[in-house]
Amino acid sequence: MRGGSTETMSIAAAALDTFPKLVRANAERLSRQVAIREKDLGIWQAYTWRDYFERSRRIALGLASLGFARGDKTAIIGDNRPELYWAVLATQALGGVPVPLYQDSIEKELIYIVDHAEARFAVAEDQEQVDKLLHVRAHCPRLEFIVYDDSRGMRAYSEPGLLSLAELEERGEKFAVGHPTYVDDEMARGQGEDTSVICYTSGTTGSPKGAMLSYRNLIAMARIATEREGLRPDDEALAYLPMAWVGDHMLSYAQAIVAGFAINCPESAETVLHDLKEIGPTYFFAPPRIWENLLTSVMIRIEDAAWPKRALTQAFLRLAQDLERRRLNGQPLPLLPRLLAPLGELLVYGPLRDNLGLRRIRIAYTAGEALGPEIFVFFRALGINVKQLYGMTEASVFVAVQKDGDVKLDTVGTPMPEVEIKISEAGEVLFRSPGVFQGYFKNPEATRQTVEDGWIHSGDAGFLDQAGHLKIIDRARDLGRLADGTMFAPKYLENKLKFSPYVKEAVTLGADRPYVTALINIDLGAVGNWAERRGIAYTSYTDLSQRPEVYELIQQEVVRVNRSLLEDEVLRGAQIRKFLILHKELDPDDEEITRTRKVRRGYIAQKYAALIEALYGERDRVAVEAQVTYEDGRTGTIRADVAIRVVSGEVSAR
Amino acid sequence: MTATAGPLLEVDGISVRFGALLALNRVSLTIPRGEIAAIIGPNGAGKTTLLNCISGFYHPYEGHIRFDGRDRTHLRPPDVAALGIARTFQNVALFRGMSVLDNIMTGRILKMRGSFLLDAVWWGPARRQELEHRAFVERIIDFLAIQAIRKTPAGRLPYGLQKRVELARALAAEPQLLLLDEPMAGMNVEEKEDMCRFILDVNSEFGTTIALIEHDMGVVMDISDHVIVLDYGRAIADGTPDEVRKDQAVLDAYLGVAHD
């Protein structure tokens, strides 16, 4: 099945129906090749596929010594660490099911998931996570054992069932004396149809749901994607997205094992951009948030540069973006810019790519929320092969991906091989593939609502164009009409707003209203920098957000968005008439956005009802109080007087 | 490390005078091994003067300071440091133009043995030695979670992080006794919580004895094993946080006077 493989290998592949079996095969086939690197104490430590299997086996023996039974669940929580990926494999080797959790979850969320998943074991990165789990255990009596990797600060803990990874492996060694073939025997009992992982989706509404994916689901989709995209064992990826997100589970775990490439775990969450530079990955998966951050960091540095440098850089960037836009639209490329492009590569694009750590990229994806077209063009213009990926947890990620050389600006590409897509009468995107999940854990009701005759209801509104590209317009239920019937696509507008480095998050409103309005979150880094350069003093985020100068700045961005809407026949009527700048950042701890940074509209509409009413009223200021939740669960209140700005004069077609 | 059984630090009736001002008036205190002791008191009570005596900056005109069982009253700061006492300062005192890493490396200077020639060509023992020191410093960087700022010049860091780097430099000297002069001054709640955790972790991981000066009473009561209260250069109370909290002399002199 895999490119260039011999006959014997494809025969062997038939038996490799679980990840533990695949890793064991990698340990033989690619024994000396690096599987995982981790930056520890400032140095990149490498582990081969043999290490990967051996360490997982030791952990599995340790778990077995504690009485791990088939079907037991292991909650996994922490930053991306080799030990945590090994704990995932160890759990699977024993016929258990790993349940990765978001490491920045607050206790309330953790209690819900650990209890719902019936986790009996937990593997945590460090003291911070252990503290949370110990509190969780008070509410979830099923949770018996907590294993931790980093023993710093753990000396004084004497809770029952709490042990370090080193102690666990030591127990495993003793256990292995009496049961030398235990792990291999358990591995042999595993089958492709078994549940491989339960990924809890953060969900923009209601409680999280646990999507059960089988080995067959994940391995099939990992193979299909690996073949279509041409991934190789010498590829390098950065494992930095939350392990609980299915995107990381697919790329850093399933695909890395299937294709045999290496993943790299950054030193800490703060060093990711630096580590990106050191590793120079060839395969890179980033949600729009990361691309926006990268763009913002570039923009800030350009603005800080001396004027000749700035002018040169901006001129070449404009040129490249213009060329790329024409290329994406299939228009002819003018001669002069084409002749200048190699110079731009030498002076601007190459150095910039290198500086961002994206020089070696062969394939880069953006997924989750849609990436603003301007951001998309920016990176492609630099010569980085960024592609839209359309996927869902319930589909084992891959549904559609833009093909190399066949990228269109406004679509998410063509369906992956073996994926069928159809559009329902209501305009909703439905699909069917080998990756379609087994259902939601202990929630047949939700499963029935999502899957019908094997077809998954994506909840997205979209259509297939003549060339077979899938175009997503919006969430089916978000797509709205103004009171006068004009079509209004909130996410589309928000992405346009978020192209501005000054706008961090935006929420637009307008369904059944007379006109469109926006709630805007400024980017503290970019706006703070902008204010500093202009000598505008501010004391806090709230203060900065309400400065009249900042309102002026954001107004220009809103006018830019309104102007760009003119190009679109359907959406032309839905220009932003009024906006306000929120006095606090939307935060997952306050449940305003999900952990994957999706805006929770319903919740925001409720929480900021007073602000929204004011946007549709006559007032130009409104006083608000907002509750904020700290990571330890305590709450505080922020008060502010928020200004409302009318965007003067609707932009109309010339 | 000498394994004497007695307390790590004994201060016995020391007095310091600046002109007509009696900054310390026969102050005595004892800090047992492995303890976190807090020194509190209103402004000008003599807290920093006391710390300066312990670290050899000032010398008392009467009384004795015994460290690890031996009289150390008249040592100079470098000798005190060599004994295993490290400190941080009330106003951050880092090399502003040097990277965080280099700043912490300076904390290792007393542990470095080398010849000028070997260091100059960076060969043999000199190279090995530097690698060992660097590895140790990396452990501290990991411990205090400052990996992301390793190469940043210290002067460009926000205040809270500078404080953390100062702690890192003090730890690099592998002290037996760590003196912290207002480690949480000017920090926000989150930074204070981080710093508390680091202080507790240092104490439990490395067994380092810690003496700290702090104004935030909440912090002091939470993390200290033992609290010493100074007022007008005299030690007016000495006991567990609970005992001190109830002490009438403290209520009158410290809490009462300071907040009127």
Image (spheres, coloured by chain):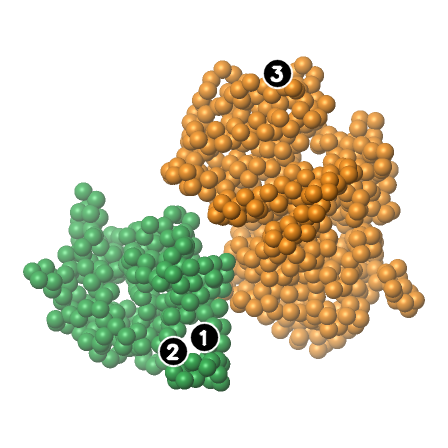
Chain colours: A orange, B green
Amino acid found under the numbered disc labelled 2: Lys
Quadrant location, the C terminus of chain B: top left
Relative side of B133 to A201, left or right: left
Chain letter of the residue carrying label 1: B
Q: Are marks 3 and 1 on the same chain?
A: no
In this rendering, is residue A61 above or below A325? below
- Badge 2 vs badge 1, beta-carbon distance below 8 Å: yes
Work out whether residue A624 or residue B244 is closer to the camera in this orientation and state it. Answer: A624
Q: Tell me the residue at 45%/75% (across/down).
A: B133
Image coordinates for residue A390, horizontal then vertical, percent: 75, 42
In this rendering, is residue A138 above or below A476? below
Q: In the image, which disc is placed on residue A514?
A: 3
Mark 2 = which residue?
B111
Could you tell me how far apart the alpha carbons at marks 3 and 2 are, in whole angstroms?
74 Å
Mark 1 = which residue?
B133
Amino acid found under the numbered disc labelled 3: Pro
Image coordinates for residue B221, horizontal then vertical, percent: 32, 54
Could you tell me how far apart the alpha carbons at marks 2 and 1 are, in whole angstroms?
9 Å
Chain letter of the residue carrying label 2: B
